[in-house]
Amino acid sequence: MKKQSRFYRGFIILVFFLFMLLHQIDKQLINPLLPDVMADFEINKTQMGAVMTGAMLVGTLLYPVWGYLYDRYARAKLLALASFIWGSTTWLSAIIPGGRANYPWFMATRASTGIDDSSYPGLYSLVADYFGPRLRGKMYGLLQLAQPLGYLLGMILALMVAPALGGWRSVFYLTGGLGIIVAVLIFFGVKEMPRGQAEPELENLEIGQYRFSWAAAKEVFKKRTMWFVFLQGFAGVFPWNVITVWFFTYLAEERFYDESSILFTMAPIILILASGYFVGGAAGDWLFKRTNKGRILVSSTGVIIGALFLFLAINTPIEARLTFFIFMALTALFMPLSSPNVISTVFDVTPPEVRSTAQAVEYFIESSGAAFAPLLAGIIADASNLKTAILTICITAWVLCFVFYLGALFFIDGDIKTLRTQMAERAEQEKAKQAA
């Protein structure tokens, strides 16, 4: 297949960035609005934590389903479907009337918003067929800028736009409608690529369609690098889910920030966090060109230094706002370094036809434990305070991630070599077919 032009590949990244940005706005928008939502439905932190956990559990359970579908069928069309589901389920969760009696209905409809949250493996897999291994870290880092930027824009919508529109429901109608528009854009604008087209051994060849097979999927679980990727994934999402759900409430209730103080503190921190994704992806690509261990080294550095600065930030006296801001900014820089590198590492060791499945399994393992993080944090906070909840969960999880990354360093070289040998064999087979 003819390699797509640089312009079209840039268009693909732009469309996927838009999908992720608007989806993250929609997904994260509820976090700054938690006090309003809790007041509307007359519920406590534990009950609100259960609502957030419900959506995460739905997304978790559907990861293997989405992964299989992406490796079996056209990924672009499935992404369009995911965008449509995002828009429609957001509307459903916004139309439930307030009051304690309607809390179960709100919990059910909010849980339905998790259906599309497990749709990213297909997006990352499709990007891997547009860009080769030496560029993927930067591309994933660029796309993942959308996550913190979506968080920031969601915060602005929640704190500034929602009151002007008449409450938290109005902004959900807005973001839900945008999801349906993006679905149309992906359906008509994004082309499918043959799986494996961007692999160095195959990129200049006309190749057939490699599709999901159970034999190839089973091989993923034999790669020892993936064992440690799965383990770090299980631990690594706990901090993210706790911070994104509860940090606004922590600032308001325990550090006594008003809405404007929260906005002007968190906005620059989130922008720094956004830069950390691209810095991590670029650093991983740079070091990967010099050693196969490069991406793992960047990832392990990020989690351990991020844990240190978060500990210092949370223990900063309440009146020392500048010091707190500096430590949180440093935390934000190091927190995301591992994210684009973990995705790239999964694709560095797995064949193209099962990459969505491998990524989906990794996300399933991540979310299966971490889905309970908001609930666990809510329980700890009700028993003690949010400071204790955030510190206990985040520091423990990141230290475990560091240990698991050290384990992956022992096996990454051999697993990458195995995949490159497999791709070279496929290239020879394709050349033989074309010569026949």
Image (cartoon, rainbow, N blue to C red):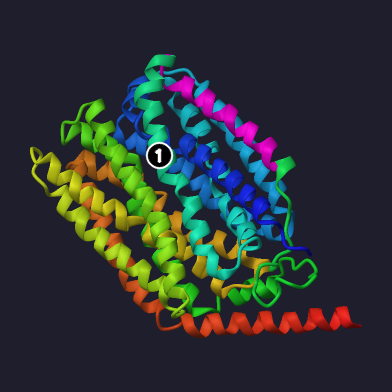
The residue under label 1 is: 151
Residue 411, image x and y in percent? 45, 82
Residue 77, image x and y in percent? 72, 46
- Check disc 1 and report its element: helix, strand or loop: helix
Residue 99, image x and y in percent? 40, 18
Residue 83, image x and y in percent? 62, 39
Classed neighbour count for the residue bearing mark 1: other residues with Cα under 10 Å, few (<14), some (14–19), many (≥20)? many
Which quarter of the image is occupied by the C terminus?
A: bottom right
Residue 171 covered by magenta stretch:
yes
Camera-side residue: 116 or 65? 116
For residue 413, above or below residue 91: below
Q: Residue furthest right?
A: 436
For residue 287, above or below residue 360: below
Which quarter of the image is occupied by the N terminus?
A: bottom right
Question: Residue at the spot x=59%, y=27% of the render?
Answer: 177
Q: Is residue 436 visible to the viewer in this orientation of the structure?
A: yes
Q: Quadrant of residue 150?
A: top left
Residue range corresponding to the magenta coloring: 166-186
Prevailing secondary structure of the magenta residues: helix
Total numbered badges shown on the rendered structure: 1
Camera-side residue: 322 or 232? 322
Question: Residue at the spot x=71%, y=58% of the render?
Answer: 4
Question: Residue at the spot x=54%, y=80% of the render?
Answer: 416
Question: Residue at the spot x=77%, y=73% of the render?
Answer: 205
Residue 64 covered by magenta stretch:
no
Name the residue type under label 1. Answer: Tyr
Q: Does residue 231 appear to the left or right of 136 in the view shown?
A: left
Q: Is residue 375 visible to the viewer in this orientation of the structure?
A: no
For residue 377, above or below residue 113: below
Q: Does residue 349 appear to the left or right of 372 in the view shown?
A: right
